[in-house]
Image (cartoon, rainbow, N blue to C red):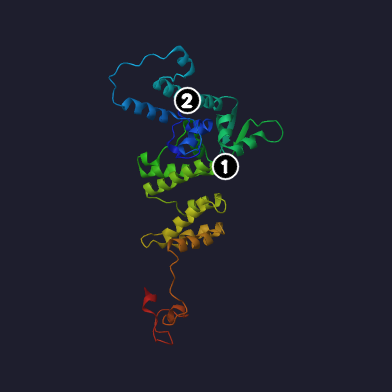
């Protein structure tokens, strides 16, 4: 689709194919400079005629045969509207029938190689990258696709979107655990969309993931954050999201998580610490800390335990014992 929320488009209409087949509809909606009168314009014209006050004068005489040969006769308004709609629907149906026909592609997902048989035309229509991959070198086409590194839960959502044109909305789900599990599946879908270069569906998956966490009032633990960060390429929105979640947990005085909680993230992902510092700076609005070179807090940098050991004040900091 060119625009709009793909998760709200019913598959039966296949609106994306209609706009592709009828660019003049899109041009007219965006204020195209040159286009034939649309049904809406015709309807407006006809309605203005119908709204005119009735004329009780004598009926007009029928046109002469010569005049009838020269003047085109416009079809009835309802006929013109219905003909146009039927034409658009017929074109969409032809496109839909084309996508849901032809050879099937065997897809094996995950370590257990869960199997799906999907229409090759449909997959290639939505992913030019996959189309190029399946054609390979020369004229020979591959008849199977292996995705051992991906999760079947995410592929289920991809299949649903391909054949139904929408994703479920996490808002409609019953409890927090269901919302969180669905969010996890949306992350798996995101990885597949990244693999197939399907940016719009990828953005929908991200929106559902964030909404799921928010409504479930749950966030990934340190192990999950480490895994998601590691699976995401540098610069990925999911890396940015994970480090901001971790940073917020660290800065939240009511949270039990602290920097030590994320030690594994620092050890397994060399860039995680850098991204987290950036996230903290972003989250705090670049707040400037107190100057550590300013005098008056000498004991903060002295090498002594709590107690009367400071050679300047004669006693340690009271707050060191807390």
- Residue 113 visible: no
First-in-chain label (1 vs 2): 2
Q: Residue furthest top?
A: 65
Q: Nearer the viewer, residue 117 or 294?
A: 294
- Tell which of 76 and 235 is nearer to you: 76
Q: Nearer the viewer, residue 152 or 322?
A: 152
Could you tell me residue 157's position as x and y percent?
Answer: 48, 37
Q: Residue furthest right?
A: 138
Would residue 138 be seen by someone viewing this image from the given angle?
yes
Q: Secondary structure at mark 1?
A: loop
Quarter of the image for residue 253 reads: bottom left
Which quadrant, please, contains the C terminus? Answer: bottom left
Crowd class of label 2 (few under 14; some 14 to 19; many from 20; radius 10 Å): some
Q: Which residue is mark 2?
A: 89
Q: Please say if the residues under marks 1 and 2 sit with CB atoms less than 8 Å apart.
A: no
243 or 43: which is nearer to us? 43
Q: Is 21 placed above or below 264 here?
A: above
- Up-down relation of residue 265 to residue 7 (above or below): below
Residue 128 appears in which quarter of the rendering?
A: top right
Q: Regarding mark 2 in the picture, which secondary structure is present there?
A: helix
Position in image of residue 106 (x %, y %): 59, 30
The residue shown at (59%, 33%) is 124
Residue located 29% across and 22% down the image = 55
Which residue is under mark 1? 197
Q: Position of residue 237 (x, y in %)?
A: 51, 51
């Amino acid at each position: 689709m060119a625009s709009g929320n793909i998760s709200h488009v019913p598959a039966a209409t296949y609106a994306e194919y209609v706009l592709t087949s009828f660019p003049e509809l899109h041009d007219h909606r965006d204020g195209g400079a040159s286009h034939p009168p649309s049904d809406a314009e015709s309807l407006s014209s006809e309605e203005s005629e119908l709204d005119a006050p009735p004329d009780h004068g004598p009926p007009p005489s029928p046109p002469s045969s010569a005049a009838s040969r020269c003047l085109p006769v416009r079809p009835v308004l309802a006929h013109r509207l219905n003909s146009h709609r039927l034409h658009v629907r017929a074109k969409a149906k032809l496109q839909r029938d084309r996508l849901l026909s032809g050879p099937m592609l065997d897809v094996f997902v995950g370590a257990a190689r869960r199997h799906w048989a999907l229409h090759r035309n449909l997959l290639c229509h939505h992913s030019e990258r996959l189309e190029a991959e399946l054609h390979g070198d020369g004229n020979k086409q591959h008849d199977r696709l292996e995705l051992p590194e991906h999760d079947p839960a995410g592929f289920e959502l991809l299949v649903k979107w391909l054949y139904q044109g929408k994703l479920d909305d996490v808002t409609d789900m019953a409890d927090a655990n269901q919302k969180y599990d669905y969010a996890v599946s949306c992350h798996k879908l995101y990885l597949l969309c990244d693999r197939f270069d399907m940016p719009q569906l990828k953005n929908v998956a991200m929106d559902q993931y964030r909404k799921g966490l928010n409504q479930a009032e749950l966030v990934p633990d340190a192990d999950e954050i480490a895994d998601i960060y590691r699976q995401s390429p540098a610069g990925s929105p999911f890396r940015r999201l994970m480090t901001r979640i971790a940073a917020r947990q660290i800065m939240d005085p009511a949270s039990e998580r602290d920097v030590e909680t994320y030690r594994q993230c620092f050890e397994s992902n060399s860039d995680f610490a850098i991204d987290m510092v950036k996230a903290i700076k972003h989250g705090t609005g670049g707040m400037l800390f107190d100057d550590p070179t300013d005098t008056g807090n000498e004991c903060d940098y002295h090498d002594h335990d709590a107690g009367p050991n400071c050679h300047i004040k004669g006693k340690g900091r009271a707050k060191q014992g807390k």
